[in-house]
C-alpha cells in the first residue's frame, strides 16, 4: 500500500513533498528501529491534517439542539486522542532504542577505537564505500534513502600516524530542507553522527547540483549540533565524469585547505588517497606520550597497540618503555607512568628529603622562604 493506504492502481494521487519522503521511508524500513521511527514521523505528519479527513461528515447537528456536536466533530476528537496515545507509545519505544544505542556507544568508547561516520546527501554512495572498505554486504542501490538504520563495521586502516583500526558507521542520507518530523523521529539515528570522532562527507560530484547538495548537508549538520566535528570531504563517483572533469575534481581536492579527496567507491579509484586523508584527520585525535610501564601492566601495553601508534618500544630493567601517540583519554589514564612525570616526582622527593644524620649534627640546612 502507498502512503494513504490505497491499493488501487488506476488512482493518481497528488501529495506534498513531506508525504512523498515519508512514503519512501516507509517502503525501505526493514528493522524494528527503522519502522518505529518512520511510524512516529507518519503520525506526527498526520496529526495536524486530521481535520480534512472528515469533511464528508456534518460539523454541526441542525436537529440535535444547541450545544450538541455532530458526528464529524466527535469522530475527529476520537481520532486525535488515538493519535496522541499512539505517538506517546512510539516515543517511549524509541527512547528505549536510544538507551540501547547509548550503551553500545559507551562500549565502543571504552574500547578506545575512533568512530568515523559516513554522512552525505541521499544516493551519494555512502553504503557503496562502506561495502568497498569492509565487505559489509549492506544494500547499496541507485535509489533514494536505501539506508535507514546505521550500520557499524570495524575497519583496519594501514598507516603509521593513526589508529590501526577504526569503526566506520553508515548513516541515513540527508536531503535539502529535511522535514522536521524526520529530524525528531530519527534523533536516535542522528546521535550516531553527533557522537562520531570524524565525519566523512560523501559528495556525489556526478550530480550537476552537487555543490547545493553539499551545502544542504552542511546545514543539516549544523542544525543537529555536529558542525564542530572534524570533517573529511570525499568527492565520489569520479568514474561517471569525463576524464578532464575528474582531473579538475582531483586538483580541487588536492588544493583544498581542509581534508578532501576524490575517489570512486565503485571502481576503487583513489581509495589509497582516501586512507591517507583519513589518517591525517585522525592524527589530530592522538597526543604524543612517553611512558615507562611496569611489566605487570601488560593489558595497558596491548591497549596502546590496539588504539594508538607506537614509535619506540624498549624493554628496560624497571618496565616497558613506550613512545608513540595515543588518544587523549588513554593518555590521561596512563599519565602516572609518564617518563616526564616520574622524573619530576623523583626530583621533588629528592628536594624534600631530610638528611637526619646531618640534622643530628647540626649541619642540616633548613629551607628558607626564598627556597620554597
Image (tube, rainbow, N blue to C red):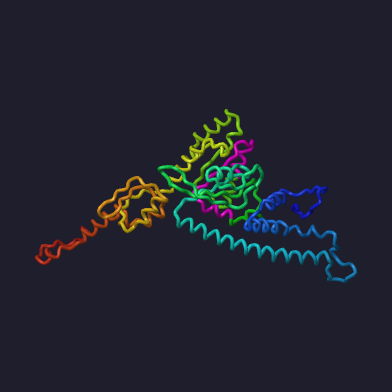
Most distant residue in the left direction: 361
Image quadrant where residue 211 sits: top right
Q: Quick check: is 282 in the magenta stretch?
A: no
Residue in view at x 81 percent, y 48 percent: 9
Using the image as rendered, state which of residue 303 and residue 37 is in the foreground: 303
Residue in view at x 58 percent, y 43 percent: 128
Residue in view at x 78 percent, y 64 percent: 76
Q: Position of residue 19 (x, y in %)?
A: 72, 51
Residue in view at x 81 percent, y 65 percent: 73
Most distant residue in the right direction: 63
Using the image as rendered, state which of residue 80 and residue 150 is in the foreground: 150
Q: Is residue 333 visible?
A: yes
How many marks are shown on the rendered structure?
A: 0
Q: Is residue 228 visible?
A: no
Q: Which residues are magenta?
A: 189-216
* Quadrant the C terminus occupies: bottom left
Using the image as rendered, state which of residue 92 and residue 367 is in the foreground: 92
Q: Position of residue 341 (x, y in %)?
A: 30, 55
Instruction: Tell me if residue 211 comes above or below residue 352 in the rendering.
Output: above
Q: Viewed as shown, does residue 115 lie left or right of 208?
A: left
Q: Quick check: is 196 in the magenta stretch?
A: yes
Image quadrant where residue 74 sits: bottom right
Instruction: Tell me if residue 234 comes above or below residue 33 in the rendering.
Output: above
Q: Position of residue 13 (x, y in %)?
A: 79, 49
Q: Position of residue 348 (x, y in %)?
A: 24, 58
Using the image as rendered, state which of residue 148 and residue 352 is in the foreground: 148
Amino acid at each position: 500500500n502507498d502512503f494513504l493506504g490505497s491499493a488501487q492502481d488506476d488512482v493518481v494521487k497528488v501529495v506534498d513533498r513531506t508525504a512523498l519522503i515519508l512514503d519512501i521511508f516507509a517502503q525501505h524500513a526493514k528493522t524494528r528501529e527503522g519502522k518505529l521511527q518512520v511510524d512516529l514521523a507518519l503520525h506526527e505528519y498526520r496529526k495536524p491534517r486530521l481535520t480534512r479527513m472528515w469533511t464528508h461528515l456534518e460539523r454541526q447537528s441542525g436537529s440535535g439542539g444547541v450545544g450538541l456536536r455532530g458526528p464529524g466533530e466527535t469522530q475527529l476528537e476520537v481520532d486525535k486522542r488515538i493519535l496522541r496515545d499512539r505517538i506517546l507509545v512510539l516515543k517511549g519505544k524509541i527512547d528505549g532504542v536510544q538507551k540501547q544505542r547509548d550503551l553500545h556507544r559507551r562500549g565502543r568508547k571504552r574500547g578506545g577505537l575512533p568512530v568515523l561516520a559516513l554522512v552525505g546527501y541521499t544516493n551519494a554512495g555512502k553504503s557503496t564505500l562502506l561495502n568497498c572498505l569492509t565487505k559489509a554486504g549492506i544494500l547499496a542501490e541507485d535509489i533514494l534513502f536505501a539506508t535507514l538504520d546505521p550500520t557499524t563495521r570495524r575497519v583496519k586502516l594501514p598507516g603509521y600516524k593513526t589508529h590501526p583500526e577504526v569503526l566506520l558507521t553508515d548513516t541515513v542520507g540527508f536531503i535539502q530542507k529535511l522535514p522536521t518530523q524526520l529530524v525528531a523521529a530519527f534523533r536516535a539515528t542522528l546521535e550516531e553522527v553527533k557522537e562520531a570522532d570524524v565525519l566523512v562527507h560523501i559528495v556525489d560530484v556526478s550530480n550537476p547540483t552537487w555543490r547545493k547538495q553539499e551545502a544542504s548537508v552542511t546545514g543539516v549538520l549544523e542544525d543537529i549540533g555536529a558542525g564542530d566535528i572534524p570533517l573529511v570531504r570525499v568527492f565520489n563517483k569520479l568514474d561517471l565524469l569525463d576524464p578532464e572533469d575528474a582531473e579538475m575534481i582531483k586538483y580541487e581536492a588536492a588544493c583544498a585547505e581542509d581534508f578532501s579527496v576524490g575517489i570512486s567507491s565503485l571502481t576503487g579509484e583513489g581509495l589509497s588517497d582516501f586512507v591517507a586523508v583519513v589518517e591525517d584527520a585522525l592524527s589530530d585525535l592522538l597526543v604524543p606520550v612517553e611512558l615507562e610501564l611496569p611489566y605487570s601492566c601488560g593489558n595497558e601495553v596491548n591497549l596502546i597497540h590496539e588504539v594508538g601508534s607506537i614509535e619506540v618500544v624498549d624493554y628496560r630493567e624497571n618496565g616497558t618503555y613506550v613512545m608513540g601517540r595515543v588518544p587523549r583519554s588513554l593518555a590521561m589514564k596512563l599519565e602516572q607512568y609518564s617518563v616526564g612525570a616520574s622524573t619530576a616526582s623523583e626530583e621533588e622527593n629528592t628536594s624534600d628529603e631530610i638528611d637526619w644524620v646531618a640534622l643530628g649534627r647540626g649541619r642540616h640546612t633548613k629551607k628558607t622562604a626564598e627556597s620554597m
